[in-house]
Amino acid sequence: MIARKIADNMSKGSMIRQMFEEGNRLKALYGADNVYDFSLGNPDLPPPSAVSQALRSLVAENQPGLHSYMSNAGHEATRQAVAAWQSSLSGLAIPAGLVCMTVGAAGALNASLKALLDPGDEVLVLAPFFFEYLAYIDNHGGVPVIVPASRETLLPDPAALEKALTPRTKAIIINSPNNPSGVIYPEETLRMLNSLLLAQPQTIYVLSDEPYADLVYDGQSMPATLAYLQNAVICTSWSKSLSLPGERIGCLVVSPRCESADQLINACVYCNRILGYVNAPALFQRVIERSINARVDIAQYEKRRDLLADVLTGAGFTLQKPAGGLYLFPVCPDADDVAFARICAGHRVLLVPGSGFRFPGYFRLCFAVREAAILGSAHAFQDIARHYGLH
Ligand SMILES: Cc1ncc(COP(=O)(O)O)c(C=O)c1O
């Protein structure tokens, strides 16, 4: 008999999973080209050529120890490359010793949470949020405290944040560019958050989940987290920026300004080991070392974002154009966003209701899909808009 909690969680399922299964059913019935699937956040651009070049040269060189265990924190040269990259972004001198290579951003979050949490410690999460945070916090005995973003700006709401803080608050997870809303936290938001947290009697750590940091559009850039937040740990990956989600390569970087930084990085490295990750994938650490400045072709994502936003607004939906990430987060025209998703599925459009991110009243569409699918979906969105009387 499996654990009751796991059985219970599995029976509830995730909305994304349900959409995935509904998508498979519809695709079997109507053919994949006739189903408009915006539900999954699976980067579909190929990795940049620097990645395949690095792989080819690594295989050709066939250095001894290429596939061996290494320090649980990762290869020294890879950590140095990551430290140099984060130092240049933040203007801080970050030593390689504060970097731990991880199994994706998810591995970085789990290692950090395990390193920080005592049973019952509270972790603030800002809705809308990546649904797995709740499971990650629970994995390590923490208690999630959900704080809704401002409905006007979709940014963290200072008053709501202040209200949610208690003596048990140990950490906060932030995510910019945000999945699902696409907002980038501006400098003022990061400054506000830093002063609010430093004003508390206990140390509160910021886990900055930023796998979309390089997917930023309209020539903007994202403020460097470590330049603004003192007790911060960056949890990130190359899943999106190099289109490598299946390779599970990421890292965590503890700020040199973080309280007990050395103790914290040692704890994270230890947790990386005992969670059973042991170390991040060896070959892909070497790939990262050689392609750390490469990125997927962001212009293609930007074009798809614009196309899908035009399809939606043209049909009468309301949305704030995302500044980064891979998702649109339009306002839902139905008071019941789950019912809305069902109606859309009836039009062969798959999306995720905002409730799946604990932010009802919106829905999420991933624009990492072929342009033909985006353009093909226009008539379906017009039919859905007509159903709701939108103009
Ligand atoms: C906000 C957010 N955080 C973390 C992750 C997990 O990233 P990774 O696949 O690198 O573990 C994802 C994946 O989609 C995500 O959207």
Image: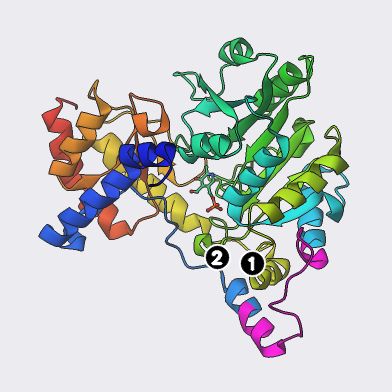
Image coordinates for residue 319, horizontal then vertical, percent: 37, 31
> Is residue 214 placed above or below 125 in the rendered structure?
below
| In the displayed structure image, the side of residue 22 where residue 265 appears, left or right | right
Rendered residue at 61%/37% (across/down): 140
Rendered residue at 58%/46% (across/down): 219
Rendered residue at 22%/56% (across/down): 24
**Scheme of colours in the image:** rainbow
Image coordinates for residue 58, horizontal then vertical, percent: 68, 82
Q: Which residue is the site of mark 1? A: 281
Distance, label 1 to label 2, CA atoms, is 8 Å
Q: What type is the residue that disc 1 sits on?
A: Pro
Label 2 element class: helix
Q: Can residue 215 be seen in this view?
A: yes
Q: Which residue is the site of mark 2? A: 247
Q: Can residue 224 be seen in this view?
A: no
Q: Is 189 or 318 nearer to us in this picture?
A: 189
| In the displayed structure image, the side of residue 142 where residue 318 appears, left or right | left
Q: Give the range drawn in magenta.
A: 55-78
Decide whether residue 276 is among the magenta residues. Answer: no
Rendered residue at 54%/35% (across/down): 138
Assess disc 1: are there few (<14), some (14-19) or many (≥20) residues with their C-alpha within 10 Å of its C-alpha: many
Label 1 element class: loop
Q: What type is the residue that disc 2 sits on?
A: Glu
Say if mark 1 contacts mark 2, CB within 8 Å: yes
Image coordinates for residue 331, horizontal then vertical, percent: 33, 27
> Is residue 332 placed above or below 61 in the rendered structure?
above
